[in-house]
Amino acid sequence: MHLAKLAWLGLALVWVAPGCAQTTPGGGGSSSSGSSNPQGLLSYRFKREIKISGGTVPTGTALSFTIDHGALVKTMKATADGKDLRVGYELDNAANELPRAVDPVSQWNQAQTVVWFRTPDKALKGATFYVYYGNDHPGLLVDDRTKIYDAWEDFHGSLNNPSWMLAKLGMADGKFELVNGSCDPKAKMCGNGTACLSDRDCDALHLTGQSNDFMGTADDGVFFHAAFAGDFVADVKIAGAGGNLGGPAKLGGLMVRQSLDVDSAFAAISVTDLPRQRVTLSRANKGDMADAAALPLEGSCDVKAKVCANNATQACQADEDCGFPQLVEVQRIGNQVTTGYFDGTAWIGMGMAATLKDLPDSALLGIPFSNISSDYGHADISWLRVYKRANPPPTVTLGKEI
């Protein structure tokens, strides 16, 4: 089952690929990304082949590659804002543009810029994929991650898919709301401590709950979720937490569940209350006692180097500066779920896979929150993405510049 077909708790949602722009030599052509460049991709001065391992390019799949965009900018082959870097494929003397966006944990004008794109929904025999750059008039382009990932939420104004919902497990109470934040342009910081360049960077899912915990033989907490079929990868950025938090509260993260029964099988990664520590949780069989394993602490600051432990890109002055943001991940392959986290430079897998008995093809994926308190606490979530996992996942590399 392809994740391009999503089951949103009983509602069938089929992702429809955006129209591909096509340009032929000497032809006009237009761009699905809004480009007004009459020559399209064929007018770019440089291109590099995108080589996708495995022989067959997976259809309707989000893939990524790394490029030294900073070097291109330095040699005046590309613009610093990335607007003239495009992705497409060539087939039958025509160039076709594909949706692309910079990774939310990456940036343009860096030595290791990560760029995502989505392959066409149908197999294209003989097509060659390229990254193009070097165009003084590339036309307008807005990074639209909803056209690349199978699910993307940055909680700006409204949900991109309104079928996300909140379950209150056990005796838990809670709600979710979308909040609009503001960015301090001088400090480049949101009110919750998240780095920002604009007010939009400070928008968040505000998940509020009053509960016991996701542990033991029965769970008690709130769960913001939807249903996804097939194998997938999900990543989330936890911006902060507050209110009444008892230790070890589960302050957001990601969870894959068999069902909404309180004793359901599940696997999850979360962040606990002080000290900010990642924790993996799992219940292999319905009704079993849940297991937990603590992962490396994030709540310590190397005062001399002024960087956080396990995240050398996050500056700090004291331990409390290292709690958030947190970026964590789950991968589902069949009935196995693995977890991981982002250390500032790469996604790091953690431990052995949890095997969940009787996990259905359409499993529940979402964000758990429990505060182990008689009053309310909250977690703020900056973004959430989900994309289909090809098995085995292809390796994507770039050829020489031509």
Image: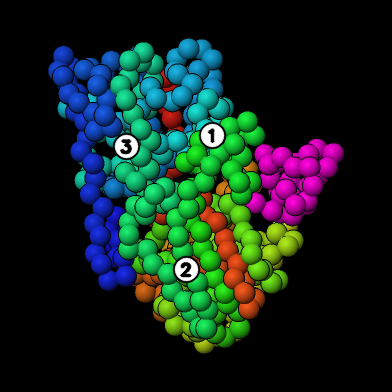
Residue indicated by mark 1: 197
What whole-number distance in Å separates the C-alpha atoms at marks 3 and 2? 34 Å
Report if residue 95 is visible in the image.
Answer: yes
Q: Is residue 323 magenta?
A: yes
Mark 1 vs 2: CB contact within 8 A: no
**Disc with the residue nearer the chain's start (1 vs 2):** 2
Q: Which residue is mark 3?
A: 99
Instruction: Tell me if residue 204 is in the magenta stretch.
Output: no
Q: Considering depth in this image, is 368 or 206 the residue closer to the camera?
A: 206
> Which residue corresponds to the image point at 49% horizontal and 21% vertical from the top-left?
80
SS of the residue under disc 2: strand
The image quadrant where one finds the N terminus is: bottom left
Mark 3 vs 2, N-terminal side: 3
Residue type, mark 1 in image: Leu
| Residue depth check, mark 1 versus mark 3: number of the one nearer the observer | 1
Point out the frontmost of discs 1 and 2. Answer: 2
Disc 1: CA contacts within 10 A as few (<14), some (14-19) or many (>=20)? some
Q: Position of residue 369 (x, y in %)?
A: 55, 68
Locate residue 228, reporting x and y percent: 36, 64
Q: Which residue is mark 2?
A: 175
Residue drawn at 16 percent across, 19 percent down:
28
Sort mark 2 into few (<14), some (14-19) or many (20+) by Cα contacts within 10 Å.
some
Q: How many marks?
A: 3
Q: Left or right of 72: which side holds 230?
A: left
Question: Residue at the location (78% across, 42% down)?
Answer: 317
- Report x, y in % for residue 25: 18, 17
Q: Position of residue 261 (x, y in %)?
A: 44, 83
The part of the chain drawn in magenta is 298-324
Task: Name the residue nearer the viewer: 60 or 314.
Answer: 314
